[in-house]
Structures are given as structure tokens and as C-alpha cells.
Image: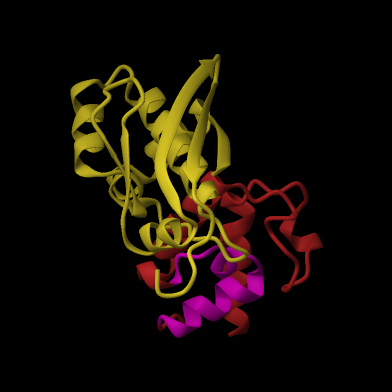
Chain colours: A yellow, B red
Amino acid sequence: MSLRVGVDIESVTSVGSTLGQFGAAYVERVFNEEEAAWARRHPSTATIFLAGRFALREAILKLVETDDSLVRWSDVVLEGGGSGPPSVRLVNDSARRAHDLGINKIHVSMGRAGDLVAAVAVADSDGPKEEGQ
Amino acid sequence: MSDVVARVRSVIAAQGHLAKDVSALGDGDDLYENGLSSHATVNLMLALENEFDLEFPDAVLRRSTFQSVEAISAALVSLGAS
């Protein structure tokens, strides 16, 4: 078994700026409906929440990245967790890539200091699958 | 195509948050090597969609699509931008 690690850091201010400029279009392209609803219910902490979720997505996509990485944030389904770490599920090409890499389960953790949120994703992997497995 | 490239450069200047001015970069220079972050890629994508009144489909949402002025312009032209 081997471990794969992905990490990302995001600025809450940058996410807030994007929210202010693109609003719903940004939320719909990057986040799922559950996350959008959570943000609507918690307007005072929505920007921090979404910055954390973006960092998580990026950290997770780095686990399955290739030379031509996907920037398909909707492939990472994050469910539950509220302001804490959610459960992680991959769909579409990212799920196929994870399968090919032998990734079993993805564990995530998050932290925040001032304007920055950080996310780490760790996956245990059985190693790349042989063709046909 | 030259008009598309000029508009792409204008959007990158506003949204890319690059380490250097986009005017100092060639059309084929790597934007990620010049400071384009993952989150700035989102801004860039959304601003390009507004500028050209189109939407990037999932199939082209890859790092290579946003890697250079040339790559972005080619993707936009393939999606109908003119």
C-alpha cells in the first residue's frame, strides 16, 4: 500500500472577491447544491466555508492529477460536515482516475489562520491497476 | 482570431493575478508557470464566459485549456467565439 497526498491553500478574501464579482455563477460551477444551501443559511461565515471547500476540492484533485489535470471541481462531491470536514466522493473522470490509481479511501483535514484556509487530502492506494482489473 | 486573442489578453490582465504583466508574455507562454493559481483559473473561466457569452463544457475543463493565451483562444474559437 502507498499513500498519496494533496494540499491546497486559499485566501478567504480572494474567494469573497470572486463571490462578489460572479455570485451565483461561481457557486453553481464549483460547489454542489448542499454546499450552496449551507452558505445561504450561514451568510456570516459563507465565504470562509466556501474557501475551505474550494481548498478541499483542489487538495483532492491533486491526488488524482495527471500531466493535464482536470479543473472539474464538480467531480469532487463533498457531503455533510457543516463547517468541519465532509465525506468525500469522486465522480466522472476523477472517479475513473482514482480507480486506475488504486485509491481506496480519501481522508481530509482543514485548518485556518487569518485570511488563509488550508486543506490536506490523504489517500491510501493499492497502486495503479493493471489493465482489465 | 486576433480579436479573440486581444480580448483573452484583456481578461487575463484583469483576472489572472499573474506574477508579471500579461503583455510581457508570448501567446504560448505557460500561465501557470507565471503565477496563474487554481482559484484564479475559476475567475478567468467565468470572466471569459461573460466576455464571449458562452460556457466551457466539462470536456474542456482541463489545465491545458487555460495554460496559455494561445490555448485559451483556440478553445474559445472551437466553442464558437469570433
Q: Position of residue A87 (x, y in %)?
A: 30, 34
Q: Where is residue A80 in the image (x, y as percent from the top left)?
A: 23, 29
Q: Vertically, is A126 above or below A51? A: below
Q: Residue at x 56, y 36 (%)?
A: A8
Q: Quadrant of the C terminus of chain A?
A: bottom left
- Say whether residue B68 is magenta: yes
Height in image: A57 above or below B53? above
Figure quadrant of residue B23 = bottom right
Q: As displayed, is residue A79 above or below residue B43?
A: above
Residue drawn at x 64%, y 55% is: B13
Range of the magenta residues? B60-79
Horizontally, residue A119 falls left or right of residue B5, namely: left
Q: Which is nearer the eye, A111 or A35?
A: A111
Which residue is drawn at the image coordinates 49% and 83% (left, top)? B77
Foreground pick, A120 / A18: A120
Identify the residue at horizontal 31%, vertical 30% (top origin): A86
